[in-house]
Image (cartoon, coloured by chain):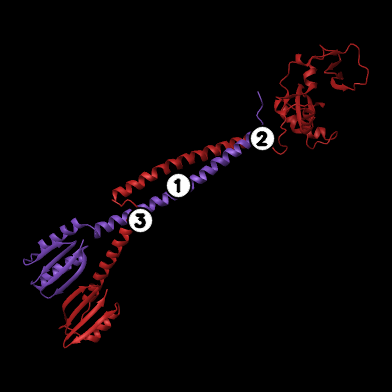
Chain colours: A red, B purple
Amino acid sequence: MRIFELPLNSTKEVLNVLPNMFEDFIDIEDQSFYVKKLEDNKYLSFAYNDSKIVEAIKRSNLNLSQVQNIYFAQIEFLNLKEEISNSFRVDNINLAFIDDILIQIPSKLQMNKDSSNFNIQNLELSKDNIYINASSKYLDSKSAYKLSAILLLLSLFTFGKYISNQQFISQIPNKIDNLKQNSKMLATSLQTNAVIKKLEKISSKQKEIREVLNYILLYKGNSKSVISSIEYVNNVVNLEYDNVSATKIKTYLEKKYQLKKIIQKGNKVIVGIKV
Amino acid sequence: MKKLNPVTVLLVMIMLFMVSALLLKQSNQDLKNLTAQLNNVKVISKQYSILKKSWDNKKQTLESLDKIIKSSGIKNLSKEVKNKKITIDIPDSSLKQISKFSNKILNGNFIILKFKITKNSLYIEMGY
């Protein structure tokens, strides 16, 4: 603990320079600082080690969660200095103010007979206190609460998205049922797929028949060439040509289709095309 | 009142976030699967409707065929609907009428099972 006279106006400014003020006297690593303004440009300051306070609380068989706040005896008793004698006892601990600084007197030293016992229960605590975060030396309370708030917001967002997803999910089966009803689909997808397969086969076959006929009709022989008959039976298209060259018609048709037969009878050519 | 430990609060929030993230991940997966299923049903239902309308529609087949017959003006045409089969027989007509009639049949969505076309006759068997 030190009392400084500094040309600074706020305790916040003093806190910023405190480590430098203490480093000549103590190792400031792992030290926390507290400052109280006594009067203009005069400050009472403390350097303390969180873990040492936590250890002291543990040695006293107290649970840290039961400790609301931690107060500095120097500050709490300073205002009572006039009321109590310079030396006094608190729970068998001998204390005394020497040059306005509260010090603990070793118990072996003779105490002034006038030293009174001070009942700590009667002490009205000031607002000057500190909070010790014993849980993690890597994370202070403020950061922990900030992170918690961010995580809470993220959780709320993800829950919101989850609820929105669930609403969409609950609507999908109805949409599927409506689609099935509107298109008069069969009860099971297996039945529907079987019908689709059957109809696709029909569609494909019918297109094929029309393509074959279209290709046949595109052939241009000589001026006397005519198709006297076209027949489709058992997946075969049978053609009867008059006045065509069997070789030419064979070459033309075989470019696209496999011929089942080609027979020339006089000026007639009979062709069978497998569809 | 017991003071809340900020680290405990943080741990609870981490757990809460993890639970919400896991739930969201699962629901995203469910949504993805169901959306894929819905899209699949959309495709299948469209395909089913088109195919049924084109190739499995007795009423439309008969109506279309009657329109073609009526507009052809062919008098000696016989039509028979029996055992899921439609038979059209034109024993004697002009090449022009035969050609026009057969073109209309071939351009329509009729299931042709059998046919024979000559210069002056036509015989077709269709399914429905």
Which residue was labeled with disc 3? A190
Q: Are marks 3 and 1 in contact (CB under 8 Å)?
A: no
In the image, is B33 to the left or to the right of B8?
A: left
Which residue was labeled with disc 1? B31
Counting residues from the start of the chain, the first of labels 2 and 1 encountered is 2
How many discs appear? 3
**Residue A194 at x, y percent in the picture:** 32, 59
Say above or below: B108 vs A146: below
**Residue A152 at x, y percent in the picture:** 57, 36
Q: Nearer the viewer, mark 3 or mark 1?
A: 3
- Three-letter amino acid code at disc 2? Val
Image-quadrant location for residue A37: top right
Image-quadrant location for residue B21: top right
Give the letter of the chain under mark 2. Answer: B
Say above or below: A98 vs B40: above
The answer to whether residue A142 of the structure is visible from this angle is no
